Image: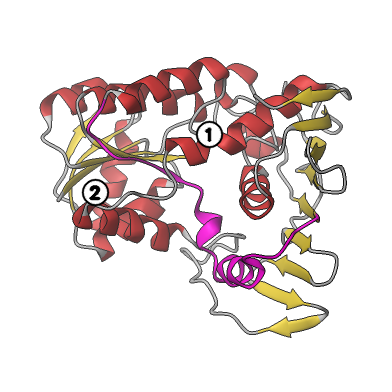
Amino acid sequence: MKAAVIGLGAISKLHIKALKLREIDVVALCDIVKERAEEAIKEFNLNAKIYSDYKDLLDNESLDVVHICTPHFLHAPISVYALAKNVNVLCEKPIAISKEQLSDIEAAVKNSKAVFGVCQQNRYNPSVLYAKKYLEGKNLISAAGTLVWKRDANYYHSGDWRGKKATEGGGVMINQALHTLDILQWFMGMPDSVIANVSNNSLRGIIEVEDTAFGLFKYKNNPNKDFIINATNAAKYSFPVNISISDGEHTVVIVGDNLIIDDKFVETEKGQPIFGKEVWGTGHINLIKDYYDCLERHKPFALDFFEARKVVKLILAMYGSDGAEKEIK
């Protein structure tokens, strides 16, 4: 198979590493900063053509898959362009930053023969997979997720698209906490409404998006079921993400790669560290492997557009709540 990577920021290294492990031929790279592509070619010993415009790449290369690793606001238009050419797409999160972008991708997916996949890779963490299997079939009634990370002014100054509503789409929720919210929704099911508040507490004047968010998600047909998310990237230190889920009888707590069931530690396979960086979420390699396995076997990929848009809908509803109950559409 032949693949290309568009956008050569930090996350692209995970994709290229996974492609190399699978012996996929990386034939093209695209970035508006040529030096990033040149560095990637040198670091990974690639024989790839360099482009500065994604349309030129997609117009001129014969590809099986394109990996989209650009800033958030470009995910949707590049996906739409690739899908129109029937090129399979593996897109970083979030797939979109607005309802309009979601609609654009949906139309493109429905009119394309290509397979659209999304990197919501924390579903592949060993602790998450173990918990998912353990809780299968149980009547879950409550869950809570907490994310406390550090994203200071230096982080936001590292890219001119960061911290801006028009280009990042939001702050801590749509960037860092999206994965936590995705796991909560995956376990609990799609809620009907949310009461949420978002605020900027530490970087006023530097960013125009939220650094802190709270959401209470509710179910119309089950008033005794809910889940909560608390997220901030205004801390002075980043802590492991904590997710707790209960059916009223048993409680599962996921803290990074660690799993606790009813107050007892459970051994799970540890995820592999990526380039020595300590992050919560080591599932990229396994997700990308699964995506290519599905392509080769002509099987559906579970994290498709319709699955990935769920968490974006939840986040957009949070942004529209302003403390009032907001229906999730």
Direction from residue 292 to residue 188 in the image, left or right = right
Residue located 54% across and 65% down the image: 125
**Disc number at residue 309?**
1
**Range of the magenta residues?**
112-141
Q: Residues within 10 Å of mark 1 (few under 14, many from 20)?
A: many
Judging from the image, what secondary structure is the residue with disc 2 in? Answer: helix
Alpha carbon separation for disc pair 1 and 2:
33 Å
Residue located 75% across and 58% down the image: 140
- Give the mark count: 2
Kind of residue at badge 2: Ile
The image quadrant where one finds the C terminus is top right
Direction from residue 79 to residue 271 in the image, left or right = right
Judged by depth in the image, the label closer to the viewer, 1 or 2, is 1
**Disc number at residue 157?**
none
- Closer to us: 74 or 327: 327
Which percent across, then down, holds residue 245?
A: 76, 61
Direction from residue 121 to residue 185 in the image, left or right = right
Direction from residue 168 to residue 107 in the image, left or right = left
Which percent across, then down, holds residue 267?
A: 63, 84
Residue located 82% across and 28% down the image: 200
The outermost residue toward the front is 221
- Closer to us: 126 or 212: 126
N-term mark: 1 or 2 = 2
Kind of residue at badge 1: Arg
Judging from the image, what secondary structure is the residue with disc 1 in? Answer: helix
Residue 198 visible in this rendered orientation of the protein: yes
Which percent across, then down, holds residue 225?
A: 82, 48
Q: Residues within 10 Å of mark 2 (few under 14, many from 20)?
A: some
- Closer to us: 110 or 272: 110
| The magenta stretch spans residue 44 | no
> On the image, numbered disc 2 is attached to which residue?
41
